Each structure stands twice: as C-alpha cells, then as structure tokens.
C-alpha cells in the first residue's frame, strides 16, 4: 500500500513538471516548418515509408524498452472560447503495452487516466507501420524524430473544405523506458501537444 501511494505521489509531481513544459507554446504559435517553408508548407509531399536502414535503426534503439510500462504525462489543447483562443492543460497517468515489429513498426496500447477529471480512456499509438504517414527527419542512437502532414475533411465540423494537420513527434529511449513528445499544428498553427514518459 505504501509503495502504491509513493508511486502515485511521485507520478503526480512528475506529471505536474511536464504540464509546465507543454504550457510553453502559445495557441498562435506557427509551426517551425511553416515558418521555414512559407506557402509551400501547404503542399503535401508523397510519403514512401521508412527505409530498411531506418527500420534497422529503430529496432536497435527501442529493443530494450519494456513490454509493460507505467507512466505520467501532460497534454495541452487549444480551443475557441468566445472568439478567443485558450489552452487547457491536463495531467495524466498511464499503463501501457509496448511492441516493436521486425519492420520497425512501433505500437503502444495505452490505458490512461485524467487525474483531476478522474476520466479513463484507451488509446493505441502506431508509428512507422506500413502505410504510416510519418517521414523520419532524424535518427540518433537514442531517439527518432518524425513528421506527418495530411489533410482532413471539415465535414464532421459542419464546414466545407479541409484542414491541414501536421504532427511533429520525437520518440526517445531512457534505459528500459520510453518518452514521447508530440506537437500538432492545424493549418500551420499550434493546436495540441502531449508529453508522455514511460518506465
């Protein structure tokens, strides 16, 4: 019981630290890709998938990650409120199952709890699987950085046309744990960010 309580307190402190980090980006902040490319940012490039060399690098980096993980993190989401953009920060706890495939595909099945709201949900994250829209930008001995960019329909929002969604993600290994930092931009502007640290 004492061990569980200590983990709970440590997790909340750890997650609160990350909530400060994700609060740093403003809702009007432009994507670094948009800043660099200008109007060319809105062009969609064809994605050919990861190479055999990249898959080998991914397997080497993440082969030590535990199959069962616990973690903490924070998410920050921008939303419209009476014409103004506001940000909501949520602290979460996780249990997860990690898998790494021979082709370099990574899957993470997550059971999450929003601590303050006492809401639970399930999510599956997939990276670098066949058909993935991620393009790898950088690989080191401990991390992979990738970007996906695609259009999604506005029909579900009751509007015509589409919006451009860009996700910049960094996956890094820490001993036998995993850290994921993901930032999403809609039409070139900050929309959401999450940081999840598993051990």
Image: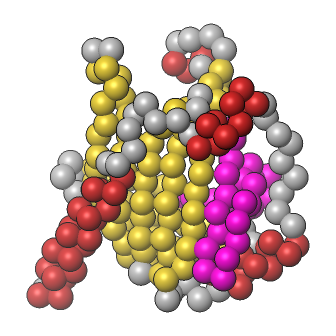
Q: In this view, does 88 lie above or below 18?
A: above
Q: In this view, does 71 lie above or below 37?
A: below
**What residue do we see at 69% from left, 30% from top?**
38
Q: Is residue 62 above or below residue 19?
A: below
**What residue do we see at 55% from left, 73% from top?**
172
Between residue 186 and residue 91, name the one nearer to us.
186
Quadrant in which residue 159 is drawn:
top right
Q: Is residue 13 left or right of residue 129?
A: left
Residue 74 is a magenta residue: no
Quadrant in which residue 52 is drawn:
bottom right
Quadrant containing the N terminus is: bottom left
Q: Position of residue 60 (x, y in %)?
A: 71, 85
**What residue do we see at 33% from left, 67% from top?**
72
- How is colour applied across the structure in the image? secondary structure
Q: Is residue 68 visible?
A: no
Quadrant containing the C terminus is: bottom left
Q: Position of residue 82 (x, y in %)?
A: 28, 15
Q: Where is residue 153 in the image (x, y as percent from the top left)?
A: 65, 23
**Total count of labels:** 0
Q: Is residue 148 left or right of residue 125?
A: right
Q: Where is residue 195 in the image (x, y as percent from the top left)?
A: 42, 60
Residue 135 is a magenta residue: yes
Between residue 39 and residue 121, name the one nearer to us.
39
Q: Can residue 38 be seen in this view?
A: yes
Kindly report the secondary structure that dominates the magenta region of the rendered protein: strand
**What residue do we see at 75% from left, 72% from top?**
104
Q: What stretch is highlighted in magenta?
A: 124-151
Quadrant in which residue 161 is drawn:
top right
Q: In this view, does 25 lie to the left or right of 186?
A: left
């Amino acid at each position: 019981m004492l061990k569980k309580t200590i983990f709970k307190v440590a997790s909340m402190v750890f997650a609160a630290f990350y909530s400060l980090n994700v609060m740093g980006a403003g809702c009007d902040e432009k994507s670094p890709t948009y800043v660099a490319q200008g109007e060319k940012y809105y062009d969609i490039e064809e994605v050919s998938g990861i190479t055999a060399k990249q898959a080998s690098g991914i397997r080497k980096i993440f082969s030590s990650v535990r199959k069962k993980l616990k973690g903490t993190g924070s998410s920050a989401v921008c939303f419209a409120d009476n014409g103004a953009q506001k940000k909501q920060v949520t602290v979460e706890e996780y249990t997860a199952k990690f898998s790494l495939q021979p082709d370099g595909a990574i899957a993470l099945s997550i059971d999450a709890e929003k601590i303050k709201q006492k809401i639970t949900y399930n999510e599956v994250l997939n990276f670098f699987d066949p058909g993935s829209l991620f393009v790898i930008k950088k690989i080191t001995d401990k991390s992979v950085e990738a970007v996906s960019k695609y259009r999604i329909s506005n029909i579900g929002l009751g509007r015509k046309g589409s919006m451009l969604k860009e996700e910049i993600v960094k996956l890094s290994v820490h001993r036998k744990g995993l850290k994921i930092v993901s930032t999403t931009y809609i039409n070139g502007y900050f929309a959401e960010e999450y940081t999840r640290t598993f051990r």
